[in-house]
Image (spheres, rainbow, N blue to C red):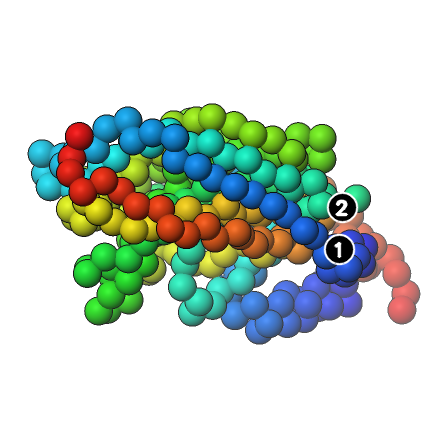
Amino acid sequence: MIVTSALIIWKALMCITGSESPVVVVLSGSMEPGFKRGDILFLHMSKDPIRAGEIVVFNVDGREIPIVHRVIKVHEREDTGEVDVLTKGDNNYGDDRLLYAQGQLWLQRHHIMGRAVGFLPYVGWVTIIMTEKPIIKYILIGALGLLVITSKD
Amino acid sequence: MCAIASLSDNLNTPSPAAEIQILNINWFQKQPHGNDEVSLTLNITADLQSLFTWNTKQLFIFVAAEYDTPKNALNQVSLWDAIIPAKEFAKFSIHTSNKYRFIDQGHNLRGKEFNLTLHWHVMPKTGKMFADKIVMSGYRLPEEYR
């Protein structure tokens, strides 16, 4: 029941936000003090143009884990509407060109998965702990399993 | 909890104020590979105290130069930014040269008219994030490199 309702909420969120994964967990301190490790961000994926100041989630070719940083520069083409975007972590000294693929100066629209619209502190620690200390995950699953077996209804 | 927090933030009607002056064009040149770059000294004065509510963790603010060119319908170049951690720091006046490089995609900056825009992003303790801006127009770059 818990699992199914969680799934329903998840799917509903996916519908409403139109994003592939409507929540992400912050993994690094590069956006501190705004976002800390373990905070959860709610994403919104829309066709709206990207603008400076927005916090976007983007993928870089050759990197597995998406990055959540702020847009500091936008150049939008007159004819095609294509954009060149530069990002930076609020807590980082320099911009993100060092994080991009070698020789890449700008992000384009297809690199950007979504933008952050809301924020819930701490809750993401659950997933961080479970990924980094798998033993805790197994204990938790075991305990849940035991609960299911022992409960009568 | 999260929803109530966001809802109560909607009830706040802020009245922020800002003024930006360009005190000096430090230098203005065309880079070897053809893009214009300019260095400015700015005076930024703002009162953003009314943006703070009980659910506000901090403000992220930045000043961007915004203009159009024949190639680009919109160019937004962030020049300076800051984090305002509490209401008592939300009324300020600062002298600064641009923190991020003001580089055009091309060489369109001579005599260019542009806007300076103060943007703020309200980062909540929990819930929905808010953003807005004040657009200040009528700025113009010199006709010649210097």
Please give left or right for residue B136 compared with residue A108 in the image: right
Amino acid type shown at disc 2: Thr
Q: Position of residue A16 (x, y in %)?
A: 60, 72
> Residue tagged by mark 2?
B53
Residue A64 seen by the camera? no
The percent coordinates of residue A138 (x first, y second) are 66, 44
Sequence-wise first label, 2 or 1: 1
Q: Residue at x 56, y 43 (%)?
A: B18
Image quadrant in which the N terminus of chain A is located: bottom right
> Measured from the top left, where is residue B3 in percent x and y?
76, 60
Q: Residues within 10 Å of mark 1 (few under 14, many from 20)?
A: few
State the residue at coordinates (72%, 56%).
B13
Query: Which image quarter: residue B35?
Result: top left
> Subunit of mark 1?
B
Q: Where is mark 1, residue-wise?
A: B12
| Left or right position of B129 against A71 | right
Element assignment for label 2:
loop
- Of all chains, the one bearing label 2 is B
Above or below residue B119? Residue A110 is: below
**Marks 1 and 2: in contact by CB < 8 Å?**
yes
Element carrying mark 1: loop
The kind of residue tagged 1 is Asn
Depth check, front residue: B92 or A148: B92
Q: CA distance from mark 2 to mark 1?
A: 7 Å
